[in-house]
Image: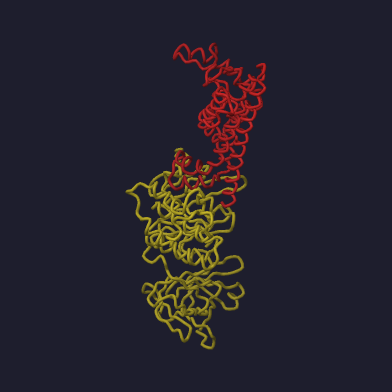
Chain colours: A yellow, B red
Amino acid sequence: MLTLDVQSRRGKFSLDVHADWQGGMLGVTGPSGCGKTTLLHILAGLIRPASGRLTLNDRVLFDGIGRVFIPPHRRSVAVAFQDDRLWPTRSVRGNLLYGYQRTPKARRRLNPEQVIDWLELEPLLDRRVTHLSGGEKRRISLGRALLMSPELLLLDEPTRGLDSRMCDRVLSLIGRSIAAAKMPTIMVSHHLEHLLRLTDQLLMMKSGRVVSHGAAHTTNFTMNRLPLMVQAHDPQAGMMTLAPQRPSGLDPSMLHAVFNPELAVGEAVVALLPSDQIVLATDPVQTMSMQNRLPGRIVKLIEQGESITCLIDAGMTLSATITRQARQNFDVREGMSIWCLFKASALDVYADDLVGFDTSAADASLIVDESGAM
Amino acid sequence: MLGNGLLSPAEWEAVSLSLQVAMGCVAVTLIPGIALGWILARKKFKGRMIIDAAVQLPMVMPPVLVGYLLIVLLGREGIIGRWLEAWFGVRIAFTMWAAVIASAAVSLPLMVRGVRLAIESVDIRLEEASRVCGASPWDVFFSVTLPGAWPGILMGSLLAFARSLGEFGATIMFAGNIAGETRTVPLALFRAMQTPGGESGVTRLAIAAIVLSVLAVVASEWLNRRSLAKREVG
Protein backbone atom coordinates (compact mmCIF):
# COMPACT_ATOMS: atom_id res chain seq x y z
CA MET A 1 0.00 0.00 0.00
CA LEU A 2 1.28 3.39 -1.03
CA THR A 3 0.37 6.82 0.27
CA LEU A 4 1.72 9.72 -1.60
CA ASP A 5 1.65 13.43 -0.86
CA VAL A 6 4.71 15.05 -2.38
CA GLN A 7 5.74 18.38 -3.77
CA SER A 8 8.76 18.94 -5.92
CA ARG A 9 10.07 21.85 -7.92
CA ARG A 10 12.63 21.82 -10.72
CA GLY A 11 13.10 25.15 -12.43
CA LYS A 12 9.72 26.20 -13.77
CA PHE A 13 8.18 22.75 -13.39
CA SER A 14 6.38 21.98 -10.17
CA LEU A 15 4.89 18.68 -9.14
CA ASP A 16 2.23 18.24 -6.49
CA VAL A 17 0.75 14.77 -6.21
CA HIS A 18 -1.65 13.28 -3.70
CA ALA A 19 -2.76 9.68 -4.14
CA ASP A 20 -3.43 6.50 -2.22
CA TRP A 21 -3.07 3.12 -3.74
CA GLN A 22 -3.92 -0.28 -2.33
CA GLY A 23 -1.83 -2.45 -4.63
CA GLY A 24 -2.33 -4.45 -7.78
CA MET A 25 -1.42 -2.69 -10.95
CA LEU A 26 -1.74 1.04 -11.55
CA GLY A 27 -1.33 2.77 -14.89
CA VAL A 28 -0.04 6.33 -14.96
CA THR A 29 -0.60 8.38 -18.07
CA GLY A 30 -0.62 11.97 -19.27
CA PRO A 31 0.97 14.19 -21.90
CA SER A 32 4.75 14.51 -22.28
CA GLY A 33 6.29 16.60 -19.54
CA CYS A 34 3.39 16.10 -17.12
CA GLY A 35 5.71 14.67 -14.46
CA LYS A 36 5.15 10.94 -14.90
CA THR A 37 8.84 10.08 -14.87
CA THR A 38 9.56 12.59 -12.11
CA LEU A 39 6.91 10.84 -10.01
CA LEU A 40 8.56 7.45 -10.57
CA HIS A 41 11.97 8.88 -9.67
CA ILE A 42 10.52 10.30 -6.46
CA LEU A 43 9.10 6.88 -5.60
CA ALA A 44 12.46 5.24 -6.32
CA GLY A 45 14.35 7.82 -4.23
CA LEU A 46 16.32 9.28 -7.14
CA ILE A 47 14.68 12.66 -6.62
CA ARG A 48 14.18 14.04 -3.15
CA PRO A 49 10.88 15.94 -2.94
CA ALA A 50 10.87 19.44 -1.47
CA SER A 51 8.13 18.57 0.99
CA GLY A 52 5.43 16.05 1.76
CA ARG A 53 5.31 12.47 2.87
CA LEU A 54 5.61 9.10 1.19
CA THR A 55 4.89 5.72 2.74
CA LEU A 56 5.06 2.23 1.28
CA ASN A 57 3.48 -0.64 3.25
CA ASP A 58 3.48 1.49 6.42
CA ARG A 59 7.16 2.29 6.07
CA VAL A 60 7.96 6.00 5.81
CA LEU A 61 10.20 6.51 2.78
CA PHE A 62 10.13 10.28 2.90
CA ASP A 63 8.88 12.81 5.40
CA GLY A 64 9.68 16.47 4.81
CA ILE A 65 8.84 17.53 8.35
CA GLY A 66 10.47 14.60 10.14
CA ARG A 67 13.46 14.88 7.77
CA VAL A 68 13.19 11.22 6.80
CA PHE A 69 14.67 10.17 3.48
CA ILE A 70 15.33 6.50 2.80
CA PRO A 71 18.00 6.30 0.08
CA PRO A 72 17.17 4.32 -3.09
CA HIS A 73 19.18 1.22 -2.20
CA ARG A 74 17.21 0.65 1.01
CA ARG A 75 13.74 1.09 -0.52
CA SER A 76 13.05 -2.20 -2.24
CA VAL A 77 11.55 -0.27 -5.13
CA ALA A 78 12.73 -1.53 -8.53
CA VAL A 79 12.65 0.48 -11.73
CA ALA A 80 12.71 -0.62 -15.36
CA PHE A 81 13.90 2.68 -16.83
CA GLN A 82 12.61 3.95 -20.14
CA ASP A 83 16.22 4.23 -21.33
CA ASP A 84 17.02 0.72 -20.00
CA ARG A 85 20.27 1.80 -18.28
CA LEU A 86 22.12 -1.48 -18.70
CA TRP A 87 25.79 -1.56 -17.70
CA PRO A 88 28.03 -1.97 -20.75
CA THR A 89 30.82 -3.41 -18.58
CA ARG A 90 28.66 -6.42 -17.69
CA SER A 91 27.26 -9.35 -19.61
CA VAL A 92 23.52 -9.89 -19.95
CA ARG A 93 23.73 -12.31 -17.03
CA GLY A 94 25.69 -9.79 -14.96
CA ASN A 95 23.05 -7.16 -15.63
CA LEU A 96 20.15 -9.48 -14.84
CA LEU A 97 21.55 -10.76 -11.57
CA TYR A 98 22.92 -7.47 -10.22
CA GLY A 99 19.86 -6.59 -8.14
CA TYR A 100 19.13 -10.23 -7.31
CA GLN A 101 22.56 -10.64 -5.74
CA ARG A 102 21.92 -7.56 -3.62
CA THR A 103 18.53 -8.77 -2.38
CA PRO A 104 18.59 -10.60 0.97
CA LYS A 105 17.97 -14.34 0.43
CA ALA A 106 14.86 -14.32 2.61
CA ARG A 107 13.23 -11.69 0.41
CA ARG A 108 13.89 -13.35 -2.97
CA ARG A 109 10.63 -14.66 -4.37
CA LEU A 110 11.62 -15.38 -7.96
CA ASN A 111 14.41 -17.56 -9.15
CA PRO A 112 16.54 -16.41 -12.06
CA GLU A 113 15.88 -19.48 -14.25
CA GLN A 114 12.17 -18.77 -14.07
CA VAL A 115 12.54 -15.13 -15.11
CA ILE A 116 15.06 -15.96 -17.83
CA ASP A 117 12.57 -18.49 -19.14
CA TRP A 118 9.62 -16.05 -19.07
CA LEU A 119 11.57 -13.33 -20.78
CA GLU A 120 13.21 -15.77 -23.21
CA LEU A 121 16.69 -14.53 -22.40
CA GLU A 122 18.52 -17.86 -22.28
CA PRO A 123 20.32 -17.46 -25.64
CA LEU A 124 21.57 -13.98 -24.72
CA LEU A 125 23.00 -14.65 -21.27
CA ASP A 126 26.70 -14.58 -22.12
CA ARG A 127 26.51 -11.74 -24.63
CA ARG A 128 27.50 -8.16 -23.92
CA VAL A 129 24.60 -5.76 -23.75
CA THR A 130 26.02 -3.27 -26.26
CA HIS A 131 24.93 -5.08 -29.42
CA LEU A 132 21.41 -6.04 -28.39
CA SER A 133 18.20 -4.79 -29.98
CA GLY A 134 15.80 -2.41 -28.23
CA GLY A 135 13.35 -5.19 -27.39
CA GLU A 136 16.10 -7.38 -25.96
CA LYS A 137 17.41 -4.56 -23.78
CA ARG A 138 13.89 -3.82 -22.59
CA ARG A 139 13.41 -7.43 -21.54
CA ILE A 140 16.73 -7.50 -19.66
CA SER A 141 15.89 -4.29 -17.87
CA LEU A 142 12.51 -5.74 -16.91
CA GLY A 143 14.09 -8.99 -15.73
CA ARG A 144 16.65 -7.14 -13.64
CA ALA A 145 13.87 -5.24 -11.87
CA LEU A 146 11.66 -8.34 -11.37
CA LEU A 147 14.53 -10.36 -9.92
CA MET A 148 14.85 -7.90 -7.04
CA SER A 149 11.43 -9.13 -5.84
CA PRO A 150 10.69 -5.51 -4.94
CA GLU A 151 7.85 -4.31 -2.75
CA LEU A 152 6.99 -1.99 -5.60
CA LEU A 153 7.86 -2.36 -9.27
CA LEU A 154 8.01 0.74 -11.45
CA LEU A 155 7.89 0.46 -15.24
CA ASP A 156 8.70 3.63 -17.16
CA GLU A 157 7.38 3.60 -20.73
CA PRO A 158 8.19 -0.09 -21.24
CA THR A 159 6.94 -0.01 -24.82
CA ARG A 160 8.77 3.12 -25.92
CA GLY A 161 10.64 2.76 -29.18
CA LEU A 162 9.39 -0.76 -29.90
CA ASP A 163 7.66 -1.80 -33.10
CA SER A 164 4.10 -3.05 -32.73
CA ARG A 165 5.04 -6.72 -32.76
CA MET A 166 7.74 -6.30 -30.09
CA CYS A 167 5.46 -4.00 -28.14
CA ASP A 168 2.79 -6.70 -28.06
CA ARG A 169 5.34 -9.19 -26.88
CA VAL A 170 6.80 -6.99 -24.16
CA LEU A 171 3.34 -6.09 -22.81
CA SER A 172 2.38 -9.72 -22.72
CA LEU A 173 5.62 -10.63 -20.92
CA ILE A 174 5.05 -7.84 -18.40
CA GLY A 175 1.52 -9.07 -17.77
CA ARG A 176 2.58 -12.68 -17.35
CA SER A 177 5.56 -11.91 -15.10
CA ILE A 178 3.65 -9.55 -12.84
CA ALA A 179 0.72 -11.94 -12.53
CA ALA A 180 3.01 -14.81 -11.61
CA ALA A 181 5.15 -12.79 -9.22
CA LYS A 182 2.19 -10.89 -7.72
CA MET A 183 4.17 -7.69 -7.50
CA PRO A 184 2.48 -4.33 -6.93
CA THR A 185 3.31 -2.46 -10.10
CA ILE A 186 3.04 1.09 -11.37
CA MET A 187 3.41 1.43 -15.11
CA VAL A 188 3.89 4.75 -16.83
CA SER A 189 2.98 5.11 -20.47
CA HIS A 190 1.45 7.73 -22.70
CA HIS A 191 -0.26 4.99 -24.69
CA LEU A 192 -3.59 4.56 -22.96
CA GLU A 193 -4.32 1.35 -24.86
CA HIS A 194 -1.05 -0.19 -23.63
CA LEU A 195 -1.99 0.54 -20.02
CA LEU A 196 -5.55 -0.65 -20.45
CA ARG A 197 -4.41 -3.99 -21.78
CA LEU A 198 -2.94 -4.62 -18.35
CA THR A 199 -5.02 -2.65 -15.89
CA ASP A 200 -8.24 -0.81 -15.30
CA GLN A 201 -6.77 1.37 -12.57
CA LEU A 202 -5.47 4.63 -13.94
CA LEU A 203 -3.98 7.82 -12.67
CA MET A 204 -3.89 10.64 -15.16
CA MET A 205 -1.51 13.57 -14.73
CA LYS A 206 -1.24 16.97 -16.30
CA SER A 207 1.33 19.69 -15.56
CA GLY A 208 2.52 17.98 -12.41
CA ARG A 209 -0.95 17.43 -10.92
CA VAL A 210 -3.28 14.44 -10.68
CA VAL A 211 -6.20 15.08 -13.01
CA SER A 212 -8.11 11.89 -12.39
CA HIS A 213 -7.58 8.71 -10.55
CA GLY A 214 -9.73 5.61 -10.63
CA ALA A 215 -11.17 2.82 -12.74
CA ALA A 216 -10.96 3.67 -16.43
CA HIS A 217 -14.71 3.78 -17.11
CA THR A 218 -15.46 6.09 -14.19
CA THR A 219 -12.86 8.67 -15.05
CA ASN A 220 -12.74 10.75 -18.17
CA PHE A 221 -10.86 8.22 -20.25
CA THR A 222 -12.08 7.55 -23.71
CA MET A 223 -11.59 3.81 -23.82
CA ASN A 224 -13.62 0.93 -22.42
CA ARG A 225 -11.72 -1.97 -20.96
CA LEU A 226 -13.79 -5.14 -20.85
CA PRO A 227 -12.60 -8.25 -19.04
CA LEU A 228 -14.01 -11.08 -21.17
CA MET A 229 -13.37 -14.63 -22.30
CA VAL A 230 -13.59 -16.32 -25.67
CA GLN A 231 -16.84 -18.27 -25.77
CA ALA A 232 -16.89 -19.65 -29.29
CA HIS A 233 -14.98 -19.49 -32.55
CA ASP A 234 -16.61 -19.13 -35.94
CA PRO A 235 -13.74 -19.04 -38.42
CA GLN A 236 -16.12 -19.32 -41.39
CA ALA A 237 -17.88 -16.13 -40.42
CA GLY A 238 -14.53 -14.61 -39.43
CA MET A 239 -15.90 -13.95 -35.97
CA MET A 240 -15.63 -15.06 -32.41
CA THR A 241 -18.12 -14.69 -29.59
CA LEU A 242 -17.04 -13.19 -26.29
CA ALA A 243 -18.64 -13.53 -22.87
CA PRO A 244 -18.04 -11.87 -19.49
CA GLN A 245 -15.34 -13.51 -17.32
CA ARG A 246 -17.62 -13.36 -14.30
CA PRO A 247 -21.39 -13.73 -14.42
CA SER A 248 -22.94 -10.34 -15.08
CA GLY A 249 -26.03 -8.79 -16.57
CA LEU A 250 -24.46 -9.02 -19.99
CA ASP A 251 -25.96 -11.74 -22.18
CA PRO A 252 -23.09 -14.16 -22.96
CA SER A 253 -23.79 -14.57 -26.66
CA MET A 254 -24.08 -10.91 -27.60
CA LEU A 255 -20.51 -9.75 -28.05
CA HIS A 256 -18.74 -10.42 -31.32
CA ALA A 257 -15.18 -9.63 -32.35
CA VAL A 258 -13.02 -10.35 -35.37
CA PHE A 259 -11.75 -13.95 -35.31
CA ASN A 260 -8.24 -14.40 -33.94
CA PRO A 261 -6.97 -18.01 -34.03
CA GLU A 262 -4.33 -17.25 -31.40
CA LEU A 263 -6.97 -16.79 -28.72
CA ALA A 264 -8.35 -20.17 -27.68
CA VAL A 265 -11.92 -20.88 -26.63
CA GLY A 266 -12.19 -20.40 -22.87
CA GLU A 267 -9.17 -18.07 -22.75
CA ALA A 268 -9.45 -14.91 -20.67
CA VAL A 269 -9.11 -11.78 -22.78
CA VAL A 270 -9.23 -8.03 -22.47
CA ALA A 271 -11.23 -6.16 -25.10
CA LEU A 272 -10.58 -2.48 -25.64
CA LEU A 273 -13.43 -0.45 -27.09
CA PRO A 274 -12.95 3.26 -27.78
CA SER A 275 -15.85 5.28 -26.37
CA ASP A 276 -16.37 7.12 -29.63
CA GLN A 277 -16.92 3.86 -31.52
CA ILE A 278 -20.24 3.25 -29.78
CA VAL A 279 -23.38 4.40 -31.57
CA LEU A 280 -26.44 5.04 -29.37
CA ALA A 281 -29.87 4.10 -30.69
CA THR A 282 -33.37 3.86 -29.25
CA ASP A 283 -34.00 0.53 -30.98
CA PRO A 284 -31.68 -2.29 -32.13
CA VAL A 285 -31.57 -1.18 -35.78
CA GLN A 286 -31.46 -4.57 -37.54
CA THR A 287 -30.83 -3.05 -40.94
CA MET A 288 -27.20 -2.23 -40.21
CA SER A 289 -24.03 -4.30 -40.55
CA MET A 290 -22.98 -3.69 -36.93
CA GLN A 291 -22.54 -7.01 -35.17
CA ASN A 292 -22.84 -5.82 -31.59
CA ARG A 293 -26.14 -4.62 -30.15
CA LEU A 294 -26.31 -4.28 -26.39
CA PRO A 295 -29.39 -3.04 -24.52
CA GLY A 296 -28.66 -0.78 -21.56
CA ARG A 297 -29.63 2.20 -19.49
CA ILE A 298 -27.91 5.57 -19.21
CA VAL A 299 -26.65 5.97 -15.67
CA LYS A 300 -24.85 9.26 -15.88
CA LEU A 301 -24.00 12.02 -18.33
CA ILE A 302 -20.68 13.78 -17.96
CA GLU A 303 -19.92 16.98 -19.83
CA GLN A 304 -16.34 17.18 -21.05
CA GLY A 305 -15.66 20.23 -23.13
CA GLU A 306 -17.31 19.79 -26.52
CA SER A 307 -18.37 16.21 -25.98
CA ILE A 308 -20.52 14.31 -23.55
CA THR A 309 -19.62 10.99 -22.01
CA CYS A 310 -22.55 8.68 -21.28
CA LEU A 311 -21.99 6.01 -18.66
CA ILE A 312 -24.24 3.13 -19.63
CA ASP A 313 -25.16 0.08 -17.62
CA ALA A 314 -25.31 -2.67 -20.23
CA GLY A 315 -24.57 -5.51 -17.85
CA MET A 316 -21.08 -4.08 -17.82
CA THR A 317 -20.41 -0.38 -17.52
CA LEU A 318 -19.68 1.18 -20.89
CA SER A 319 -18.73 4.74 -21.66
CA ALA A 320 -19.85 6.24 -24.97
CA THR A 321 -18.93 9.70 -26.20
CA ILE A 322 -21.37 11.80 -28.19
CA THR A 323 -21.40 15.43 -29.26
CA ARG A 324 -23.62 18.12 -27.72
CA GLN A 325 -25.51 18.24 -31.00
CA ALA A 326 -26.24 14.51 -30.84
CA ARG A 327 -27.47 14.88 -27.29
CA GLN A 328 -29.90 17.63 -28.27
CA ASN A 329 -31.23 16.00 -31.44
CA PHE A 330 -31.64 12.76 -29.67
CA ASP A 331 -32.81 14.03 -26.26
CA VAL A 332 -30.43 11.81 -24.31
CA ARG A 333 -31.31 11.78 -20.60
CA GLU A 334 -30.07 9.98 -17.54
CA GLY A 335 -32.19 6.92 -16.80
CA MET A 336 -33.33 6.32 -20.37
CA SER A 337 -33.08 2.92 -22.05
CA ILE A 338 -30.73 2.80 -24.96
CA TRP A 339 -29.04 0.42 -27.38
CA CYS A 340 -25.28 0.46 -27.82
CA LEU A 341 -24.18 -0.49 -31.31
CA PHE A 342 -20.63 -1.11 -32.49
CA LYS A 343 -18.80 -3.08 -35.13
CA ALA A 344 -17.00 -6.33 -34.35
CA SER A 345 -13.78 -4.69 -35.50
CA ALA A 346 -14.15 -1.90 -32.94
CA LEU A 347 -13.19 -4.42 -30.26
CA ASP A 348 -9.43 -4.83 -29.87
CA VAL A 349 -8.97 -8.18 -28.19
CA TYR A 350 -5.84 -9.31 -26.31
CA ALA A 351 -5.01 -12.25 -24.09
CA ASP A 352 -5.51 -11.21 -20.46
CA ASP A 353 -2.06 -11.86 -19.05
CA LEU A 354 -2.96 -10.61 -15.62
CA VAL A 355 -5.48 -13.38 -14.89
CA GLY A 356 -4.92 -14.44 -11.30
CA PHE A 357 -3.27 -11.14 -10.37
CA ASP A 358 -5.50 -9.24 -8.03
CA THR A 359 -5.96 -5.83 -9.60
CA SER A 360 -9.42 -5.33 -8.18
CA ALA A 361 -8.15 -4.82 -4.63
CA ALA A 362 -7.46 -1.26 -5.62
CA ASP A 363 -11.01 -0.38 -6.65
CA ALA A 364 -12.40 0.89 -3.38
CA SER A 365 -9.89 3.64 -2.81
CA LEU A 366 -9.34 4.47 -6.43
CA ILE A 367 -12.82 5.42 -7.50
CA VAL A 368 -12.26 8.88 -6.16
CA ASP A 369 -11.89 11.65 -8.61
CA GLU A 370 -9.35 14.04 -7.18
CA SER A 371 -9.97 16.81 -9.64
CA GLY A 372 -13.70 16.93 -9.22
CA ALA A 373 -14.00 16.97 -13.01
CA MET A 374 -16.85 14.48 -12.98
CA MET B 1 72.13 -9.61 -18.67
CA LEU B 2 71.47 -9.27 -22.38
CA GLY B 3 72.35 -5.62 -22.61
CA ASN B 4 75.49 -5.77 -20.46
CA GLY B 5 77.57 -4.67 -23.40
CA LEU B 6 75.34 -1.74 -24.24
CA LEU B 7 75.32 0.10 -20.94
CA SER B 8 77.75 0.18 -18.05
CA PRO B 9 76.62 -1.36 -14.74
CA ALA B 10 76.09 2.12 -13.30
CA GLU B 11 73.96 3.08 -16.28
CA TRP B 12 71.90 -0.11 -15.97
CA GLU B 13 71.44 0.79 -12.36
CA ALA B 14 70.07 4.19 -13.39
CA VAL B 15 67.63 2.58 -15.87
CA SER B 16 66.43 0.04 -13.33
CA LEU B 17 66.13 2.76 -10.66
CA SER B 18 64.14 4.92 -13.07
CA LEU B 19 61.67 2.08 -13.64
CA GLN B 20 61.43 1.33 -9.91
CA VAL B 21 60.82 4.97 -9.06
CA ALA B 22 58.21 5.27 -11.81
CA MET B 23 56.38 2.18 -10.56
CA GLY B 24 56.60 3.47 -7.00
CA CYS B 25 55.22 6.78 -8.21
CA VAL B 26 52.19 5.08 -9.82
CA ALA B 27 51.65 2.98 -6.70
CA VAL B 28 51.74 6.04 -4.47
CA THR B 29 49.51 8.25 -6.65
CA LEU B 30 46.92 5.67 -7.76
CA ILE B 31 44.65 5.64 -4.70
CA PRO B 32 44.80 9.40 -3.90
CA GLY B 33 44.46 10.07 -7.64
CA ILE B 34 41.30 7.98 -7.90
CA ALA B 35 39.87 9.54 -4.74
CA LEU B 36 40.59 13.12 -5.88
CA GLY B 37 39.44 12.41 -9.44
CA TRP B 38 36.18 10.97 -8.16
CA ILE B 39 35.57 13.89 -5.80
CA LEU B 40 36.25 16.43 -8.55
CA ALA B 41 34.12 14.55 -11.08
CA ARG B 42 31.12 13.75 -8.90
CA LYS B 43 30.91 15.96 -5.83
CA LYS B 44 29.61 19.48 -5.70
CA PHE B 45 30.69 21.37 -2.59
CA LYS B 46 32.12 24.70 -1.53
CA GLY B 47 35.88 24.82 -1.89
CA ARG B 48 35.90 22.41 -4.80
CA MET B 49 37.67 25.04 -6.90
CA ILE B 50 40.40 25.28 -4.26
CA ILE B 51 41.04 21.54 -4.31
CA ASP B 52 40.98 21.60 -8.09
CA ALA B 53 43.55 24.40 -8.21
CA ALA B 54 45.74 22.83 -5.52
CA VAL B 55 45.81 19.54 -7.41
CA GLN B 56 46.78 21.19 -10.68
CA LEU B 57 49.37 23.50 -9.17
CA PRO B 58 52.39 21.14 -9.34
CA MET B 59 51.78 20.82 -13.10
CA VAL B 60 52.37 24.52 -13.72
CA MET B 61 54.95 25.26 -10.99
CA PRO B 62 58.64 24.84 -11.81
CA PRO B 63 59.56 21.31 -10.64
CA VAL B 64 62.51 22.80 -8.79
CA LEU B 65 60.06 24.76 -6.68
CA VAL B 66 58.07 21.59 -6.00
CA GLY B 67 61.31 20.01 -4.82
CA TYR B 68 62.03 22.99 -2.60
CA LEU B 69 58.55 22.83 -1.05
CA LEU B 70 59.05 19.12 -0.40
CA ILE B 71 62.27 19.94 1.49
CA VAL B 72 60.39 22.54 3.51
CA LEU B 73 57.77 19.92 4.38
CA LEU B 74 59.63 16.63 4.54
CA GLY B 75 63.31 17.58 4.77
CA ARG B 76 65.36 16.78 7.92
CA GLU B 77 64.55 20.22 9.30
CA GLY B 78 61.14 20.30 7.58
CA ILE B 79 57.76 20.78 9.23
CA ILE B 80 56.79 17.12 8.99
CA GLY B 81 60.25 15.69 8.35
CA ARG B 82 61.62 16.81 11.73
CA TRP B 83 58.76 15.14 13.48
CA LEU B 84 59.12 11.94 11.44
CA GLU B 85 62.80 11.66 12.34
CA ALA B 86 62.29 12.43 16.03
CA TRP B 87 59.42 10.01 16.54
CA PHE B 88 60.08 7.18 14.11
CA GLY B 89 63.69 7.71 13.12
CA VAL B 90 62.54 7.91 9.52
CA ARG B 91 64.49 10.01 7.06
CA ILE B 92 62.98 10.64 3.69
CA ALA B 93 65.08 13.33 2.03
CA PHE B 94 67.93 12.03 -0.14
CA THR B 95 66.64 8.44 -0.25
CA MET B 96 64.92 6.51 -3.03
CA TRP B 97 61.62 7.29 -1.29
CA ALA B 98 62.35 10.97 -1.78
CA ALA B 99 62.73 10.31 -5.52
CA VAL B 100 59.39 8.48 -5.51
CA ILE B 101 57.65 11.27 -3.58
CA ALA B 102 59.14 13.98 -5.83
CA SER B 103 57.88 12.10 -8.89
CA ALA B 104 54.52 11.53 -7.26
CA ALA B 105 54.09 15.23 -6.49
CA VAL B 106 54.60 16.28 -10.10
CA SER B 107 52.67 13.26 -11.53
CA LEU B 108 49.58 13.49 -9.33
CA PRO B 109 47.92 16.22 -11.47
CA LEU B 110 48.19 14.00 -14.55
CA MET B 111 46.79 11.02 -12.67
CA VAL B 112 43.90 13.08 -11.28
CA ARG B 113 43.14 14.54 -14.69
CA GLY B 114 43.01 11.09 -16.31
CA VAL B 115 40.83 9.62 -13.56
CA ARG B 116 38.53 12.62 -13.49
CA LEU B 117 37.85 12.54 -17.23
CA ALA B 118 37.31 8.79 -17.05
CA ILE B 119 34.81 9.06 -14.20
CA GLU B 120 33.01 11.97 -15.84
CA SER B 121 32.56 9.76 -18.90
CA VAL B 122 30.68 7.14 -16.85
CA ASP B 123 26.99 7.92 -17.31
CA ILE B 124 25.53 9.02 -13.99
CA ARG B 125 22.25 7.34 -14.94
CA LEU B 126 24.04 3.97 -14.84
CA GLU B 127 25.05 4.76 -11.26
CA GLU B 128 21.44 5.65 -10.43
CA ALA B 129 20.30 2.33 -11.87
CA SER B 130 22.67 0.54 -9.58
CA ARG B 131 21.47 2.49 -6.51
CA VAL B 132 17.91 1.45 -7.34
CA CYS B 133 19.08 -2.16 -7.64
CA GLY B 134 20.13 -2.06 -4.00
CA ALA B 135 23.77 -0.99 -4.21
CA SER B 136 25.20 1.29 -1.51
CA PRO B 137 27.31 4.26 -2.68
CA TRP B 138 30.54 2.27 -2.13
CA ASP B 139 29.08 -0.68 -3.96
CA VAL B 140 28.09 1.59 -6.86
CA PHE B 141 31.64 2.92 -7.03
CA PHE B 142 33.29 -0.50 -7.15
CA SER B 143 30.70 -2.28 -9.30
CA VAL B 144 29.79 0.41 -11.84
CA THR B 145 31.96 3.54 -11.69
CA LEU B 146 35.37 1.90 -11.41
CA PRO B 147 34.84 -0.75 -14.13
CA GLY B 148 33.48 1.95 -16.43
CA ALA B 149 36.37 4.31 -15.75
CA TRP B 150 39.08 1.67 -15.84
CA PRO B 151 40.58 2.44 -19.28
CA GLY B 152 40.92 6.11 -18.32
CA ILE B 153 42.46 5.25 -14.97
CA LEU B 154 45.00 3.08 -16.77
CA MET B 155 45.74 6.00 -19.09
CA GLY B 156 46.27 8.29 -16.11
CA SER B 157 48.62 5.76 -14.53
CA LEU B 158 50.62 5.50 -17.72
CA LEU B 159 50.92 9.28 -17.96
CA ALA B 160 52.11 9.42 -14.35
CA PHE B 161 54.60 6.64 -15.11
CA ALA B 162 55.93 8.51 -18.14
CA ARG B 163 56.10 11.80 -16.26
CA SER B 164 58.09 10.10 -13.53
CA LEU B 165 60.62 8.72 -16.05
CA GLY B 166 61.35 12.28 -17.17
CA GLU B 167 61.34 13.86 -13.71
CA PHE B 168 64.47 15.91 -12.91
CA GLY B 169 63.96 19.21 -11.09
CA ALA B 170 62.01 18.16 -8.03
CA THR B 171 64.10 15.01 -7.67
CA ILE B 172 67.48 16.75 -7.71
CA MET B 173 66.26 19.26 -5.11
CA PHE B 174 64.59 16.84 -2.73
CA ALA B 175 66.40 13.52 -3.37
CA GLY B 176 69.78 14.68 -4.64
CA ASN B 177 71.87 12.80 -7.17
CA ILE B 178 73.05 9.76 -5.24
CA ALA B 179 74.28 6.81 -7.29
CA GLY B 180 72.16 3.67 -6.75
CA GLU B 181 69.75 5.56 -4.53
CA THR B 182 68.27 8.49 -6.40
CA ARG B 183 70.23 8.68 -9.65
CA THR B 184 67.58 7.95 -12.26
CA VAL B 185 68.29 8.19 -16.01
CA PRO B 186 67.81 11.99 -16.32
CA LEU B 187 70.04 12.61 -13.28
CA ALA B 188 72.66 10.18 -14.56
CA LEU B 189 72.57 12.01 -17.89
CA PHE B 190 73.08 15.34 -16.15
CA ARG B 191 75.94 13.88 -14.14
CA ALA B 192 77.60 12.42 -17.24
CA MET B 193 77.35 15.80 -18.99
CA GLN B 194 79.26 17.40 -16.12
CA THR B 195 81.94 14.71 -16.04
CA PRO B 196 84.92 15.32 -18.34
CA GLY B 197 85.00 12.59 -21.00
CA GLY B 198 81.45 11.50 -20.22
CA GLU B 199 80.16 12.08 -23.78
CA SER B 200 79.83 8.38 -24.66
CA GLY B 201 77.86 7.84 -21.45
CA VAL B 202 75.61 10.75 -22.39
CA THR B 203 74.88 9.19 -25.77
CA ARG B 204 74.09 5.76 -24.30
CA LEU B 205 71.87 7.22 -21.58
CA ALA B 206 70.14 9.47 -24.08
CA ILE B 207 69.33 6.44 -26.23
CA ALA B 208 68.07 4.56 -23.16
CA ALA B 209 65.88 7.53 -22.20
CA ILE B 210 64.49 7.80 -25.73
CA VAL B 211 63.70 4.06 -25.84
CA LEU B 212 61.87 4.26 -22.50
CA SER B 213 59.89 7.32 -23.59
CA VAL B 214 58.93 5.77 -26.92
CA LEU B 215 57.73 2.63 -25.14
CA ALA B 216 55.61 4.70 -22.78
CA VAL B 217 54.08 6.75 -25.60
CA VAL B 218 53.34 3.64 -27.68
CA ALA B 219 51.71 1.95 -24.71
CA SER B 220 49.55 4.98 -23.96
CA GLU B 221 48.52 5.32 -27.60
CA TRP B 222 47.59 1.63 -27.68
CA LEU B 223 45.50 2.00 -24.53
CA ASN B 224 43.85 5.10 -25.87
CA ARG B 225 42.82 3.40 -29.10
CA ARG B 226 41.56 0.40 -27.28
CA SER B 227 39.34 2.43 -24.99
CA LEU B 228 38.11 4.53 -27.93
CA ALA B 229 37.24 1.38 -29.85
CA LYS B 230 35.36 0.10 -26.83
CA ARG B 231 33.45 3.34 -26.49
CA GLU B 232 32.42 3.24 -30.14
CA VAL B 233 31.12 -0.25 -29.66
CA GLY B 234 29.20 0.97 -26.61
For the residue pair B50 and B73, the one nearer the viewer reads as B73
In the picture, measured across the screen, residue A259 lies left or right of residue A10, that is: left
In the picture, measured across the screen, residue A294 lies left or right of residue B69, that is: left
Q: Position of residue A33 (x, y in %)?
A: 59, 54
Q: Where is residue B175 in the image (x, y as percent from the top left)?
A: 57, 18
| Residue B166 seen from this side | yes
B105 vs A159: above or below: above
Q: Residue furthest left?
A: A106
For the residue pair A243 and B218, the one nearer the viewer reads as B218
A139 vs B90: above or below: below
Q: Position of residue A58 (x, y in %)?
A: 38, 47
B182 vs A38: above or below: above
In the picture, measured across the screen, residue B222 lies left or right of residue A334, that is: right
B171 vs A338: above or below: above
For the residue pair A281 and A81, the one nearer the viewer reads as A81
Q: Which residue lies furthest to the front in this view?
A: B5
- Residue B204, located in which quarter of the rendered image? top right
Q: Where is residue A254 in the image (x, y as percent from the top left)?
A: 44, 81
| Residue B104 seen from this side | no
Total numbered labels: 0
- Residue A231, located in which quarter of the rendered image? bottom left
